[in-house]
Structure formats: C-alpha cells, structure tokens
C-alpha cells in the first residue's frame, strides 16, 4: 500500500540528535572532612525521617504536621500537578487527532456577474457533517522531544517539591531547637537571678550591720539588674521561635503558644559523619535531581529545535455527509471521503530556525553548568556542616570543662568570703563567670543540634520515593 513505507518510517523515527544521557560527575571518593573516624552516616531509610533520631516525640509530631499543612509545600505540590498536566497536554497533541464537525451555509450569488453559473438569483443551501482525522508522522523526533522536555519539566517540578520538603523539615527542627535553647537559657538566667537577689538581700543586711560596704551592695545590685536585663531578649527569642513554628505549620503566629509554653530539654544531637561515597548520598538530594531533570529538558528542547529544520509529513482523512438539504444528509449518495498525505517543509525563514537552535543549545549549556555548580555547592554544604558539627562538639567539651571549673571557683569564693578571706566582689565575679559558662554551654548544645540537622539537610534527608 501507499502508506506502508510512511508507517514504517514513522515507527522507526530517525531522530536527528542522539538520546540524552545523564552527565558523568567527577566526585571524590570521600568527603575531605569525613576522616575523623566518627561512625558512618545513617543509611537512606533513616535519612528519610532523620528527625526521629533526635529522640523528641513533640519535634517529630511538629515535622509531620508541617509536611501536611505547610502552605509553601502545598503550593509546590500544586505546581507538580500543573507540570504533569502540561506534560499530558503536549503528549496528547503529538498523537493522532480526530475532530467532528457540522455546518450549514446559505449563498446568494450576485446577479451582476453575468453568467448562469453565478447569476442564479435563488439562494444555494449547503449542509455538511463528518469527521476529520490527522496524524503527523514524527520522522525526525520533533514531537517525541517535545514530550520528553515536558516530561522532564514535570519530574523537575516533583524534585522541587521534594526540595521544599527537605528545607521545611530542617526549618521546623531549627526553630524547635532554637525555642528549647532559648527556654533553657531563660531558666538558667532566672535561677541565677534568684541566687543573685538572695546575695543582694544578704549584702544589704550586712551593710546595715556595718559588716559590708555600700560598694559591695551596689555591685550586687548591678549584677542582679544586668542578669534581669537578659530575660527580655531570651523571651523574645522563644516567642519568635514559636511564631516561626506556627507559620511553618500553616497556622497563625500565636497558635502554638500554649502548646509550646512549657520548657523542655534541647534534643540530643546524634553523632553523624558522611563517611560514605558522596555519590551515594549527594545524588539523592532533590535539588541536584531537579537540576539534572532541568538539564534533560533543556537538551530535549535543543533537539526539538533541530528537528524543526526538517520537513513534516502528516496523514489526513475525512469522512462525512454533504447535501443541499438537511433531509438528504442521511441519503447514501451524500457520503464523502478523502484521504491523503501532507507535506510541510521550511524553505526560507531568514535564519530564524537556526537562530532558535543556537539559543536552545546555549540554554542547554547553561543548564549543564547550573547542574555542575549545584553539585559543587552540595559538596561544600556537606563539608561545611561536617566541620561545624565536629568543631562545635569539641567546643562543647571545652565549655563543659569551663562550667565545672567556674562552679568550683564560685564555691571556693563563697567559702572564702564566709571566712573573711575574700570580699563580695570575688563572689559576684564568680557568679557572673558561672552564669556565662552555663549560658554558653546551653547555646552550644543548641548550636550542635542545629549543625547536625543542617548536615542531614545537606545530605538530602527528609523525603522518600
């Protein structure tokens, strides 16, 4: 048959460019900062829900609620639906098409045309109904590349939604740790303030008995006032963390004030190190996967632009009924049928098509560079997080030693003051040093936990297939 060669050619579709291949990445065997001998990072199943490793049920509940209610994540999911619909639309337009049509027309010719064919003063009626079918043979892969690009766009939208979820989980945990750190620092400050107020009262009694100077009393009062001045700042930090958590959960800022008003321990940061192969961990990051899908889409659009340079061949067929009167449409003699191929070939468009090829090639090159840059940034984020967690753990050990020493110094100063070997200034200074050490250690525990969750984020934790 006439169509056999065309159908055979359509089935084999000689595409003008090779199929896309994921670019090979040159990744180091190990992270530079992963040589400390710390136990390896948790496998991907634990990375999917890394917040459970912190051992805080309330934090886990807040993360799950945020994953269900966060407005940014819900909007990202709607973008996924939009991209999938766009893919379905492009795929639908590349296949066979069948349309139904019906119409009627009345024509009255001019009597001044001067011939019997067009000079008939009686109106002519024309009625028709039928079906039209068409199918473009995708000989050079233009339609296939368009579908491929739209599919890559839908997959990139999915990865973007996962990246939003990864960031969301980390933000919820960060705000929660910030809240607990502020609450613990506030509790320590209040406890120290009570002790300092007791000291003020004692010094006042001794000053009235001429056993202490007014200078000692003024120093004690000044230290208590300075400690009291720390409370508003800590209360502000706690309130900001609660408000941030509420918004992350898609709630008004004050919605969690009652639920999170009671203080609790700062979550204990697990020991983590990315001692595995970077490709095994980094390439699961949604932002890298999304950048790779954007590269695939750009490559497909570049191939589509090249295919525009070649001819298009389409098959068309029409089956219908035509008659001058509506009542004759169902008569057997009213049937009409047509079938035949069509050819469209671009001949001269002032170089517009080739300019489009160059533009799409440049976009594909930019996408490749963005992908490579995203990989480098991901490596840097993991290395930075490893350094931050490791150094903060070492800093925390030193702060614990400093706190133990400052508490011993405070006890010694109080003993010496009672025996007259030291004045109240030494006691006040020891109290101030102990408060500073306690606050610094609490902040370090919060910072270590934050650095750890940032490492989980950098490794792409917080989502699953």
Image: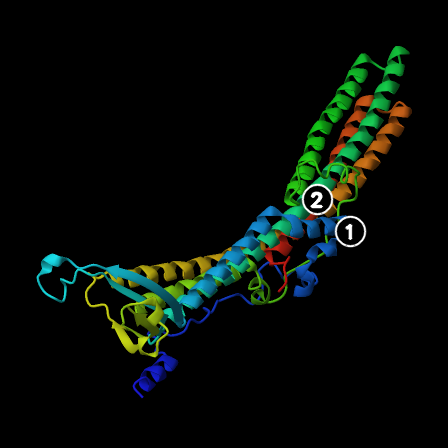
Q: In the picture, which quadrant includes the N terminus?
A: bottom left
Decide if residue 71 is in sight here: yes
> Image check: 139 left or right of 175?
left
Residue under numbered circle 2: 176
Disc 1, SS: helix
Dot 2, crowdedness within 10 Å: few (<14), some or many (≥20)? many
Give the quadrant of residue 17. Answer: bottom left
Give the quadrant of residue 128. Answer: bottom left
Percent position (x, y) of residue 30? 58, 65
Residues at badges 2 and 1 in contact (C-beta under 8 Å)?
no
Vertically, is 384 above or below 420?
A: below
Q: Which of 99 and 120 is in front in this view?
A: 120
Q: Nearer the viewer, residue 103 or 454?
A: 103
Residue at (69% x, 30% y) in the render: 233
Vertically, is 411 above or below 359?
A: above
Residue under numbered circle 1: 57
Give the quadrant of residue 286. Answer: bottom right
Percent position (x, y) of residue 411? 86, 33
Vertically, is 259 above or below 300?
A: above
Percent position (x, y) of residue 389? 66, 51
Percent position (x, y) of residue 370? 44, 57
What is the total number of numbered labels drawn onto the structure image?
A: 2
User: Which residue ends up furthest to the bottom in the rendered image?
Assistant: 1
User: Which residue ends up furthest to the left in the rendered image?
Assistant: 114
Badge 2 or badge 1: first in the primary sequence:
1
Dot 1, crowdedness within 10 Å: few (<14), some or many (≥20)? few
Q: Distance between the residues labelled 2 and 1?
A: 12 Å
Q: In the picture, which quadrant includes the C terminus?
A: bottom right
Residue at (60% x, 64% y) in the render: 281
Residue 81 numbered tag: none
């Amino acid at each position: 048959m006439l169509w056999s060669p065309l159908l055979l050619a359509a089935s084999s579709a000689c595409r003008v460019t090779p199929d896309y291949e994921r670019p090979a990445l040159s990744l180091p065997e190990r992270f530079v900062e992963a040589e400390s001998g710390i136990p390896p990072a948790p496998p991907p199943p634990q990375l999917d829900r890394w917040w459970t490793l912190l051992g805080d049920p309330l934090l886990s509940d807040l993360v799950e609620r945020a994953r269900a209610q966060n407005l940014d994540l819900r909007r990202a999911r709607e973008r996924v639906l939009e991209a999938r619909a766009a893919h379905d639309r492009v795929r639908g337009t590349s296949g066979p098409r069948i349309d139904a049509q019906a119409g009627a027309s009345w024509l009255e010719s001019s009597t001044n045309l001067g011939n019997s064919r067009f000079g008939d003063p009686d109106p002519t009626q024309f009625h028709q109904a039928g079906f039209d079918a068409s199918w473009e043979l995708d000989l050079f892969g233009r339609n296939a590349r368009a579908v491929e690009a739209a599919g890559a766009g839908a997959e990139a939208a999915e990865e973007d939604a996962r990246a939003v979820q990864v960031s969301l989980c980390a933000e919820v945990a960060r705000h929660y740790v910030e809240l607990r750190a502020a609450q613990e620092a506030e509790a320590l400050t209040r406890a120290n303030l009570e002790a300092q107020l007791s000291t003020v009262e004692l010094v006042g009694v001794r000053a009235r008995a001429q056993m202490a100077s007014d200078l000692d009393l003024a120093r004690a009062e000044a230290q208590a006032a300075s400690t009291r001045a720390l409370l508003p700042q800590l209360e502000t930090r706690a309130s900001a963390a609660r408000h941030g958590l509420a918004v992350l959960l898609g709630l008004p800022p004050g919605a969690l004030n009652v639920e999170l008003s009671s203080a609790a321990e700062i979550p204990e940061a697990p020991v983590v190190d990315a001692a595995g192969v970077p490709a095994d961990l980094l390439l699961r990051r949604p932002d890298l996967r999304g950048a790779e899908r954007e590269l695939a889409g750009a490559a497909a659009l570049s191939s589509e632009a090249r295919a525009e340079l070649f001819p298009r061949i389409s098959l068309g067929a029409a089956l219908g009924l035509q008659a001058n009167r509506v009542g004759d449409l169902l008569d057997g003699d009213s049937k009409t049928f047509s079938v035949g191929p069509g050819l469209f070939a671009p001949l001269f468009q002032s170089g517009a098509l080739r300019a489009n090829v160059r533009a799409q090639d440049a976009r594909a090159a930019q996408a490749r560079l963005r992908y490579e840059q995203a990989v480098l940034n991901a490596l840097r984020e993991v290395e930075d997080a490893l350094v931050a967690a490791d150094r903060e753990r070492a800093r925390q050990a030193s702060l614990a030693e400093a706190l133990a020493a400052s508490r011993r110094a405070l006890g010694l100063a109080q003993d010496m003051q009672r025996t007259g070997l030291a004045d109240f200034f030494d006691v006040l200074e020891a109290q101030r040093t102990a408060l500073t050490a306690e606050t610094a250690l609490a902040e370090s525990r919060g910072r270590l936990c934050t650095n750890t969750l940032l490492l989980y984020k950098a490794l792409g934790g917080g989502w699953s297939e």
